[in-house]
Each structure stands twice: as C-alpha cells, then as structure tokens.
Amino acid sequence: MHQSQNLALQQVLAPQLQQSLLILQAPLLELRNLVQQEMETNPVLEDLPNELSPDEPNGAEPSANDNFKEEFDKLARLDEEWRDYMAQSSSYSGRSREAKDKRQFFFDSIATEETLQQHLMGQLNQTALTANDRKTAEIIIGNIDDNGFLQSTPEEMSFTSGIPKEDFEKMLALIQSFYPRGVGARDLRECLLIQLQREGKQSSFEYKIISEHMEDLGKRRFPEIARRMNISVEQVQKGANNIARLNPRPGQAFCAAPQNYVLPDVTVEKVNGDYQIILNNEQIPHLRISNTYKDIIAQDNNGSEVKDYVRDKIRSGKFLIRSIHQRQQTISNIAHQIVSRQRDFFERGTSQLKPMTMGEVADAVGVHETTVSRAVSGKYMATPQGIFEMKYFFTPGYQTATGESMSNTSVKEAVLGLVKHEAGNAPLSDQEIVEILSERGIPIARRTVAKYRTELNILPSNMRRKY
C-alpha cells in the first residue's frame, strides 16, 4: 500500500517537476510562449492588470470550507510576494499601450531575406526564353546550394529529367552569367575562374595560377608554384593576395542570416561606480489566480466535482507562479555572483576574465551545479562590454607564475594577440607561442596551443607565411 502511494505521488509530481525544470531552462522568449500556452489551458490564471496596485486586495477568502482556507492563505501570500517582486523590480515600469505598439512595430519591421534561389529566379524571369529552356534553367537553379555551387552535373540532370545534356550546358552558361559572380560553378576552381572571366582577366597572372596550380595554391606551396612558373615567390604571394579578394562562396550573401537577435535576461549597468543587476521581467506575463475561481470554491452550492477541478487548476497555477519566481530569483543570484567575481572583466574586457566554475557558483548560491547549468543555458547578459551568453563567464583556467588566476578565454586572447602581431615572413610556431607565454608566466602545453589555435580558426605557421 505504501509503495503504491509513493508511486502515485511520483506520477503526480513528475510532470510538475518537469515543468519547473523546463521553466528554469527556457530562454526569455520561449518562457513567454510557455506561460501563454499555460494560460490558454488553465482558466484560473490571469495576467496582472497594469492598473492593479500591489496593495490592492486579491479577492474574497473562502469561508465555507475550512480545508481550503489554509491553502488560500498561502496562495494570497504568494500572490502578494509575486506582485511585490514585480513592483520592486527596477526593470518593470508597466506595459503601456505605447510600449506594446513599439515592440510590435519592431517585430513587424524585421525584413524577410531574399534567398539565392529567389534572386536567380528573378534574373531568369527577366530573360527571354522558350518554355523548354526555362524548365531546364529552373532545374539547374534548384540544384544550386546556398553557397552558390552546382550540386549536380549536366549528365545527372539530363538522366533524371530526359532533357538533352547540351541544353543543360547551354543554360548553365547563362546562369553563370548571373549575379553574384561565380554562381553556378561546380567547384572552387571554376568559381574563381568565372569571377576573373567576368572581370575580363582571362589572361591575367592570377587566372593562370588558379587554372594550372590550384592544388598548390590551396596548400600555400608558393615556392613550388614559383619554381614551376619560373617566377619569384614574392610574385606568387602578390597573385595569391589578389586571388584572396575573390569570393569563394558567392551565394553566402543570400543565405538566411542566423537568428542572432537575443533578448537578455539580465542587464548589468554601472551606476555611480557600482554595477546594478536588472532582470528583464517585461517579457513574462505577470500572473495571478483569478478571484472568480476562488469564489467558486467558496460557494456552498458548487458540487465536490467542480471544487476538485478548480482546486487542481489552482494548484497548477500556483506551482507555475512559484516556478517562474524561483527561476528569476535563481538567475538573479547567479548574475550577482558573476558580477562580483568578474568585476575586472566588466571594467576592462575579455583579457581580464577570471577562471570560474559552475560548482563554485552553485556552492555560493546554495543550489546544485546542474541547476546553475540549466539556469544559464540559453540566457544572455547585457554588459558594458557587450552582450554575452551567461555560460561565457564560466571557464577553467591557469595559475600564473605570480599566483594569479587566468581563464582559458584570456589565454586564447593572448594566443590570438601574438598571431595578429607576428611577422608575416616568420610566423610563430606553436612551440614559439608556448615559450613566449611561459616567459609571461603562463604555463601551457604545445598541444593546448594547437587546440586553441584550431578553435580560433588560425592556420598552422607554415600556411600563415607571407613572402
């Protein structure tokens, strides 16, 4: 009997706990959608009106059933705490009609990007073609990827469509004359050659390098190219610099831009020499339990079935409000720890980022490490140094020779700085970077430098050499 009760209790609690974790982990805009969905399915929840004063009573207390009185006393206190929390938040100033209109105008103003395929079809529609040629050209455009490269051959398209291969070759030549230059190429070599042809540089030195020495160019074997062309390495370097100005992915400009618009959960501002933390509560509906449903419970003429239904909905609503409140409080506590521990970063930037682990912050806040991980997942912080994902501030680090702590991110910045200022004709090897950092008191292994260099998209030293 005891085991079955525990099992039943787990079945009841599991969805609530799952909801609580989901609310904690959800980014701000996703949380807003979750809350709005919950409001649609739970009739006892209502959005707190703007004109409601935090001190305004929240409806009649149930008097008919003493079993419910204690529950509603707790609920009333929770409602008051939630409204006080919203009222005291320095980021909450009431959602006026004007503010809502501004936000809607912003979202309505986001332009829809034209795709590469749409752009090519627009140029095709301006070209006088027969119906068969148009169909052939449309098949070709359908086989061009977002980088602008043709992903099928005329032979393959002819086999699948039944249209002669010569027709595909003729229409491909037409499409390769479209904008952007280089579109419709079958590989990088053809892409670069098309761009030079469109510029009238078929006889250029660069055209010959691409046409005859593409593999060596890709591996930056400049001495080998110079030997074969019987010219100096410096001339090859100059030609390679000109080739580097061409576009290796002509369709990229038309790729749908990543959704990089983020809404920070936390804003950090410096006021009178001190940093203030402001939570973004504006996007979250400010919930309370409707007084109408409290009255339904309080009335004696409502049957137990109605009361049970309403009580269940009220408990769900109460848990949702508590979960949102707990989410905001957890994020606030973590944000205070970040600002306290990373003050040098807020003052002087990335180079001053200190090592900080989620376990350390979890101990300071009084929660489990996984709670910190969920709380910072997908959340952003607006700072005087820019907008950063909250996970950015958590990084292991090194102990320098002077006993100071230095984060991995700061070490990466140091590696990047060394490469940026190296001599072009004598780029630093990984071992030389290790020795320089060691002289600065930063102990680091060569394989770690190689790893950081790869993460920073920095080529090996032999491929960074300039002649």
Image (cartoon, rainbow, N blue to C red):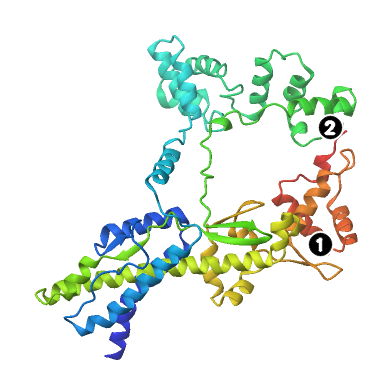
Q: Quadrant of the C terminus?
A: top right
What is the number of the mark on residue 222?
Answer: 2
For residue 453, above or below residue 13: above
* Among the 4 quarters of the image, the one containing residue 249: top right
Amino acid, disc 2: Phe
Answer left or right for 177 relative to 461.
Answer: left
Extreme left residue here? 301
Q: Position of residue 77 (x, y in %)?
A: 36, 75
Q: Compare residues 75 and 418 and report the one nearer the observer.
A: 75
Q: Compare residues 395 and 94 and report the one nearer the observer.
A: 94
Q: Position of residue 346 (x, y in %)?
A: 69, 57
Q: Residue at 53% of width from left, 34% of height from top?
A: 255
Extreme bottom residue here? 2
* Among the 4 quarters of the image, the one containing residue 356: bottom right
Amino acid, disc 1: Ala
What is the number of the mark on residue 445?
Answer: 1
Graded by Cα atoms within 10 Å as few (under 14), some (14 to 19) or many (20 or more), the crowding at tag 1 reads some
- Marks 2/1: CA distance? 31 Å
Graded by Cα atoms within 10 Å as few (under 14), some (14 to 19) or many (20 or more), the crowding at tag 2 reads many
